[in-house]
């Protein structure tokens, strides 16, 4: 007697970046700039604030806000150790009144809907300090199946995505294509670009939007579709722009 083939259950994975993706707002960037300022020229902080505002409007050609702060500091002769100390100091302030961050509305509900279909992982170049506190504050730490800190993107993301892609389709979500998406795309993952560069980036992405909030429905659709036995192979989705 012929038996129909059983449908295989696929468990896709969504790998989120943190800064500029889940966590939004200029608070941490301004905290970094303020800690750099004593080592830079007298007008450094004013120039950094103006450049950050321009970057958010889509101007400037920087990789992200941290690139804005660091590039201006380097041009002022600030040393790598001083910038590193300032960065780590700003991370210790993350989520406090000195470096406030916000996130998308109803983040918990969004992640809970995704968890019905997919594994959720966080992969960031930032250290754990500060992020763990923010995730707890938002009540979402336990929504992630894995948390990866100080990943060393872009190269370090390959190992995270390679492990995930063994289980099924992968969607990488981030605000820096070269760091958050390109290594995943090279392994066959789908990608979602958000943030200030989403409108102008020439990168080939599956979906993109000015913020994570703009593509919530698209990500949820991806998770539900990728988790079905009839889902298209990872990397084969149609580009969606918001």
Image (spheres, rainbow, N blue to C red):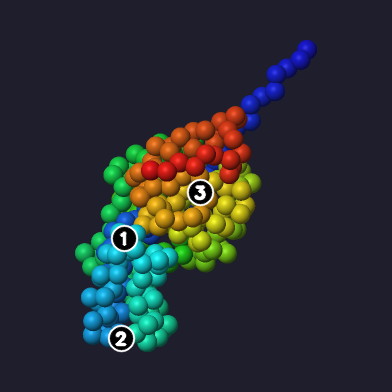
Examine the rendered structure and indicate whether residue 14 appears above or below residue 99: above
Q: Which residue is mark 3?
A: 205
Secondary structure at badge 2 equals helix
Task: Pick the quarter of the image with the N terminus.
Answer: top right
Q: Which residue is mark 1?
A: 56
Q: CA distance from mark 3 to mark 2?
A: 39 Å
Residue shown at the point (25%, 70%) measured from the top left: 50
Crowdedness of circle 3 by 10 Å Cα count: few (<14), some, many (20+)? many
Residue 224 position in % (x across, y down): 49, 33
Secondary structure at badge 1 equals helix
Q: CA distance from mark 3 to mark 1?
A: 20 Å
Crowdedness of circle 2 by 10 Å Cα count: few (<14), some, many (20+)? some
Q: Indicate the quadrant where residue 12 lies.
A: top right
Residue shown at the point (55%, 57%) measured from the top left: 182
Residue shown at the point (39%, 37%) measured from the top left: 217
Q: Residue 21: tell me if it is visible.
A: no
Which badge, 1 or 2, is on the more N-terminal residue?
2
Examine the rendered structure and indicate whether residue 142 appears above or below residue 113: below
Examine the rendered structure and indicate whether residue 23 appears above or below residue 31: above
Q: Are marks 1 and 2 in contact (CB under 8 Å)?
A: no
Q: Which residue is mark 2?
A: 39
Residue 66 position in % (x across, y down): 37, 69
């Amino acid at each position: 007697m012929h038996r129909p083939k059983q449908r295989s259950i696929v468990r896709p994975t969504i790998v989120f970046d943190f800064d500029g993706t889940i966590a939004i707002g200029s608070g941490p960037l301004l905290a970094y700039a303020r800690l750099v300022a004593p080592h830079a020229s007298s007008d450094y902080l004013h120039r950094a604030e103006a450049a950050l505002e321009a970057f958010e409007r889509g101007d400037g050609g920087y990789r992200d806000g941290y690139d804005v702060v660091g590039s201006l500091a380097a041009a002022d002769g600030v040393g790598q150790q001083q910038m590193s100390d300032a960065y780590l100091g700003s991370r210790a302030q993350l989520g406090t009144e000195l470096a406030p961050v916000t996130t998308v509305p109803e983040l918990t509900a969004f992640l809970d809907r995704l968890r019905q279909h997919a594994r959720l992982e966080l992969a960031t170049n930032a250290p754990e300090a500060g992020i763990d506190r923010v995730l707890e504050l938002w009540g979402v730490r336990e929504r992630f199946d894995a948390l990866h800190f100080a990943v060393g993107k872009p190269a370090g993301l390959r190992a995270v995505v390679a492990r995930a892609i063994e289980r099924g389709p992968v969607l990488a979500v981030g605000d820096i294509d070269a760091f958050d998406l390109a290594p995943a795309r090279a392994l066959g993952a789908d990608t979602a670009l958000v943030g200030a560069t989403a409108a102008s980036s020439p990168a080939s992405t599956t979906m993109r939007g000015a913020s994570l909030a703009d593509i919530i429905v698209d990500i949820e659709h991806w998770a539900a579709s990728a988790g079905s036995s009839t889902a298209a192979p990872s990397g084969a989705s149609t580009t969606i722009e918001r």
